[in-house]
């Protein structure tokens, strides 16, 4: 390329291309570091598999599955793998509720019926605190349904409907019993 053919417009395009390549290479290095870290943690913590997404400024910068989604069938995890997360959602729900308490948007002493008017009348006086601490007395749908509770995913409305006609296990606030329904 001669200096005569290298006009200012082309110079800008070249600088732009070099900048994009530098960004891609820099991301590639970080991606490799993320991959190495995740692979080490899978082995170190005996994690069979996981799906990961890294979002920066509202943009997906990395999305990948690692390890296995199914050990028996040796199915690899993908970014679209759906994992059963079980009761870990309870901690996130409790944290979200406490954020609302901090913001003055609710009080854990409030009855659940204040926020969930569709729940059965017998549950309306149960407080948010009692739901969070498993002292509400609401029957655990998993105990009522048994193994079938794990085989058939249900919506919140279906869970409520399934146990709505069951009596409370005990008066709210008088005992403790782990309840997935609550």
Image: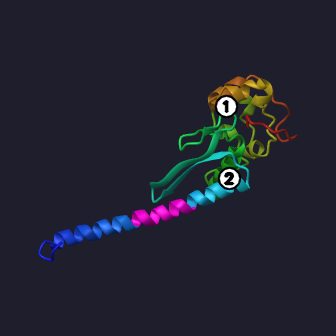
The magenta segment: 23-33
Q: CA distance from mark 1 to mark 2?
A: 42 Å
Q: Residue furthest left?
A: 4
The answer to whether residue 54 shows anywhere in this view is: yes
Provide the residue designation for mark 2: 42
x and y percentages locating residue 1 in the rendered image? 18, 72
For disc 2, the neighbor class at 10 Å (few under 14, some 14 to 19, many from 20) is: some
Depicted 33 relative to depicted 96: above or below:
below
Q: Quadrant of the rendered structure where residue 143 is? A: top right
Q: Residue 23, position in %: x, y?
A: 40, 66
Please tell me which residue lies in front, 131 or 90.
Answer: 90
Q: Which residue is pictured at 86% across the width and 41% down the height? A: 176
Residue at the spot of label 1: 119
Q: Nearer the viewer, residue 167 or 30?
A: 30
Q: Which residue is rendered at x = 64% and y = 32% of the image?
A: 156
Q: Residue at x 34, y 69 (%)?
A: 19
What is the basis of the colouring in this image? rainbow
Give the left or right position of residue 182, taking residue 177 as reference.
Answer: left
| Left or right relative to 20: residue 25 | right
């Amino acid at each position: 390329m001669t200096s005569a053919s290298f006009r200012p417009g082309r110079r800008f395009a070249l600088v732009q291309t070099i900048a994009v390549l530098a960004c891609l290479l820099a991301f590639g290095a970080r991606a490799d570091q993320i991959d190495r870290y995740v692979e080490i943690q899978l082995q170190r913590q005996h994690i069979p598999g996981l799906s990961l997404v890294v979002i920066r400024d509202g943009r997906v910068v990395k999305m990948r599955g690692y390890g296995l989604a199914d050990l028996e069938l040796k199915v690899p995890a993908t970014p679209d793998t759906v994992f059963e997360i079980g009761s870990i959602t309870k901690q996130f729900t409790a944290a979200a509720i406490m954020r609302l308490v901090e913001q003055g948007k609710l009080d854990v002493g409030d009855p659940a019926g204040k926020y969930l008017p569709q729940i059965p009348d017998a549950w309306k006086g149960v407080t948010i605190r009692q739901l969070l601490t498993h002292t509400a007395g609401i029957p655990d749908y998993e105990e009522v349904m048994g193994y079938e509770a794990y085989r058939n995913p249900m919506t919140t409305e279906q869970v409520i409907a399934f146990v709505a006609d069951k009596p409370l296990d005990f008066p709210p606030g008088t005992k403790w019993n782990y309840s997935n329904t609550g």
